[in-house]
Amino acid sequence: MSTKSNVNSAPSVQENKPQTLNRSLILRALLMVSLYWFSMYVYIPHTATFLRELSVSQSMIGLVAGSYGFAQIFLRPPLGIFADLRGCAKVFIVAGVIVPAIASLVRIASPTGTGFLLGNTLSGVGAAVWVVFIIFFSQLFGKGAIQQATALIMGANAFGQLLGFIFSALFYNLLGMRFLCWLSVGASVLATIIAISFRQSSTEDASLACDVQTPPSVKSAEKLTFKHIIPALKNKRLWFFSAIAIMQTGIVLATVTNFDTQRVRQLGGNNTMVGLLTITFMVFQMLASFISSTYRFRKYGAKTWVPLCFVALALYCFLSPLITNLIFLFLIQILTGFFAGTITSFTVAEATKEVPESMHTTAMGIFQWMVAIGIIILPMFSGQIVEKTGSFDTAFHVIGAVALVFLVLTIWGTRTKKLDAKKPIYDPTAPNSTENS
């Protein structure tokens, strides 16, 4: 067997030469991603308020919010597998970016609890396609650049969400939910136009092709089948770092976007201050994502940054309950925002390190599936602690303690050889590859 063609080496920290990259294509892809996430976030800050004004029950509002996450949990793993087997990113991307427009048209046509339930479910379907976006974008940078690409695309993700929150804050009281939904439709349509504009790259390197109409394995040794993907689904490193993703996203949603926004009001803040707190966090999350794509940042690797991020998150959990001033509550968002924006690209790189590139979308489906689980489970768990104890402090301390446990796990996981696969995962799409008997 040709080991060279079947083993994914650790992500390289060497800088890609600017002249080897299609800058125009990368910028268009980043713009498409920002429009895509804007279209799914511009109405979110005021959805609960809008439904309450319509006298929709609290349980129905909770179901509307949950339907977005549940759709992703069910769809992300099979979508990742199917995308790898099909081998055509463009079809999935175009479908993903147009779905938010359809979802918002449903909200406009039926501004009721049921209409928003259907709209949020459709948005969840569109968000599930995100697993294809990340791998498609990483292919524009060539082999071994998934950390750099993920950092950039997560920055575009955060920028789109940030703009969505800003536009929502500016226009909801003036023009209402219907206008926000039309903004969502417009952004989604623009993103779709950009996605359709992608064409087959002229480069000889197939990994840089932005529109693969046939599976890449057609010109290779063998066609990729589900049988070949099974070993990737069993990869220990993939599951370990995907589990780490549960905590990294769960901590942020349970504390920053839930507890801290409520504590703003406890400390005398108003709705404007709540919005500014969220925006502060998102700005530094976005900046960190872009900065972590640079050579000087990524040369230290996951061994440094992943544990350091959990140190920062644990520190935040133990410091936040001590804060009794709005200024300090805003300042601590810089800490959490920066490290929350840093950690994702490194955990993605570690999770996919041993998985052949032809199966990266499958791996990303698993990773993002775990992220979706963290989005739902951790806020529910922390909310129950608050209900039973009547205090945010206890919940912060419990989550902080869990973060310390994950800190130890990440120190071990980024250094141990026990997570290494005993043999390389066979990649049938690699030229001149033969399966180990």
Image: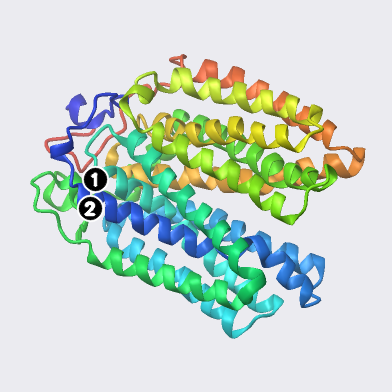
Nearer the observer, 76 or 107: 107
Residue 1 visible? The answer is no
Question: Which amino acid type corresponds to the residue marked 2 in the rendered image?
Answer: Leu
Whether residue 125 sits left or right of residue 19 in the image: it is: right
Q: For numbered disc 1, what is the local secondary structure? A: loop
Whether residue 141 sits left or right of residue 117 in the image: it is: left
Crowding at mark 2 (Cα within 10 Å: few <14, some 14-19, many 20+): some
- Rendering coords of residue 234 (x, y %): 45, 35
- Rendering coords of residue 408 (x, y %): 60, 17
The image's mark for residue 378 is: none
Discs 1, 2 touching: Cβ within 8 Å: yes
Quadrant in which the N terminus appears: top left
Residue 353 visible? The answer is yes
Query: Residue at 52% across / 73% down in the picture?
Result: 103
Query: Residue at 43% across / 73% down in the picture?
Result: 186
Calculate the distance from the C-alpha at mark 1 to the C-alpha at mark 2.
Answer: 8 Å
- Rendering coords of residue 267 (x, y %): 83, 42
Q: Which residue is mark 1?
A: 140
The number of callouts visible is: 2
Quadrant in which the C terminus appears: top left
Q: Sequence order check: which comes first, mark 1 or mark 2?
A: 2
Looking at the image, what colour scheme do you see? rainbow
Q: Which residue is mark 2?
A: 25
Question: Which amino acid type corresponds to the residue marked 1 in the rendered image?
Answer: Leu
Nearer the observer, 270 or 391: 270
